[in-house]
Amino acid sequence: PPPVTASTVNWTRAQPPLLRFLHACYANFLPEDGGAVADYIPELGKADPAHFGIGLATLDGHVYEVGDTRIPFTIQSMSKPFVFALALDTLGAERVERVIGVEPSGDPFNSIRLNAENHPFNPMVNAGAIACSGLIHADKGDGAFEYIRQALGRFAGRELDVDEAVYASESATGDRNRAIGYLLRTNGVITENVPDVLDVYFRQCAILVTARDIAVMAATLANRGINPLTEQQVMTPYAISRALSVMTSSGMYDFAGEWIYRVGVPAKSGVGGGILAALPARLGLGSYSPKLDKHGNSVRGIKVCQALSAHYDLHML
Ligand code: DON
């Protein structure tokens, strides 16, 4: 037989099956036109609804990328599991768990309702996330945001910047989150100056990531806190396991039950259009597509996760 050389290999067929599958997801779900770009934060309304990127990172450090995986967008609520994990490691689990619950709320992400103890239901809804930002602020003061930015960068394996326009836009319009902040303070959940805490929260939500970054961050969660690219242990296994736990029960808000039943992979969405899914000991997925459903979850991102879970039997239960 003739020798196998670069010119005799059919590279289309030589594509790894997983990459071919991701390409098929991209092609199949690109025409999907349901949902709407979030515009309650006015600056988010400028996102291009055509953008669609899928990144998948394996625990041996390989990153598969299809579509717009290098377009930056704001992390928004996908920051929540990381800042919760950071709070656990920084202030100790006892301190954090004393003031933030871990029960699903069944409410939308921006609900102002607290639990029977007047604490946030969990760290994945805005109230719980603002409480986490408050705890970090209590420990780090003016350095709180920089401390968070650096920590998230270790998950991504690179320095992450902030979208100043999105930050300013949310800060100018975020009165509901401010109201939640004051409610938390009057209930003793946060002890800090509320505007300072909200400033940390709005900035952390405006951190810029790509679908590729989200895949690597998810893979780091799936890898018990070891970033598969840098091989650095970026957080304790305890904090990682508890962040994944609350993603499992509450990561997709009032769609969380349906999600874990149908897809079976811990995940977190953001109103910037990202979905992060982390399957422990297996892989991390990051998708970007800015049109959202009524729960605030990316329409195409949900489709990708459903397809991957079904095709590769990823349901963890
Ligand atoms: O606080 C907010 O409303 C936004 N900064 C984040 C909300 C969000 O991403 C909800 N996720 N789907």
Image (tube, rainbow, N blue to C red):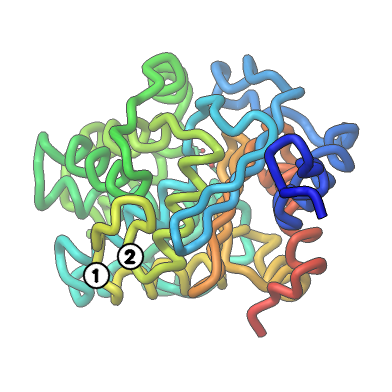
Q: Which residue shows up at 27% across the image and 53% down it?
A: 186
Q: At 43% across and 51% down in the image, what residue appears? A: 217
**Crowd around label 1: few <14 · some 14–19 · many ≥20 (10 Å):** some
Say which element carries label 1: loop
Secondary structure of the residue carrying tag 2 is loop
Q: Quadrant of residue 273?
A: top right
Which residue shows up at 26% across the image and 51% down it? 185
Contact flag, marks 2 and 1 (Cβ < 8 Å): yes
State the residue at coordinates (64%, 20%).
47
Q: Is residue 78 above or below residue 206?
A: below
Q: Position of residue 68 (x, y in %)?
A: 64, 29
Decide which of 237, 132 is in the foreground and name it. 237
- Residue 15: x and y in percent read 73, 48
- Give coordinates of residue 67: x percent, y percent: 69, 32
| Cα gap from disc 2 to disc 1, whole angstroms | 6 Å
Whether 279 is drawn above or below 227: the answer is below
Q: Which mark is residue 192?
A: none
Looking at the rendering, in which quadrant would you find the N terminus?
bottom right
**Which residue lies most toward the front here?**
1
Q: Amino acid at mark 2?
A: Gly
| Along the line of sight, the residue nearer the viewer: 307 or 185 | 307
Residue 170 is drawn in which quadrant? top left
| Three-letter amino acid code of the residue under disc 1 | Thr
The mark tally for this picture is: 2
Residue 127 in view (yes/no): no
In the visual, does 9 lie left or right of 156? right
Res 225 label = 2
Quadrant placement of the C terminus = bottom right
The image shows residue 177, relative to residue 1, as above or below, that is: above
Query: Which residue is the site of mark 1?
Result: 236
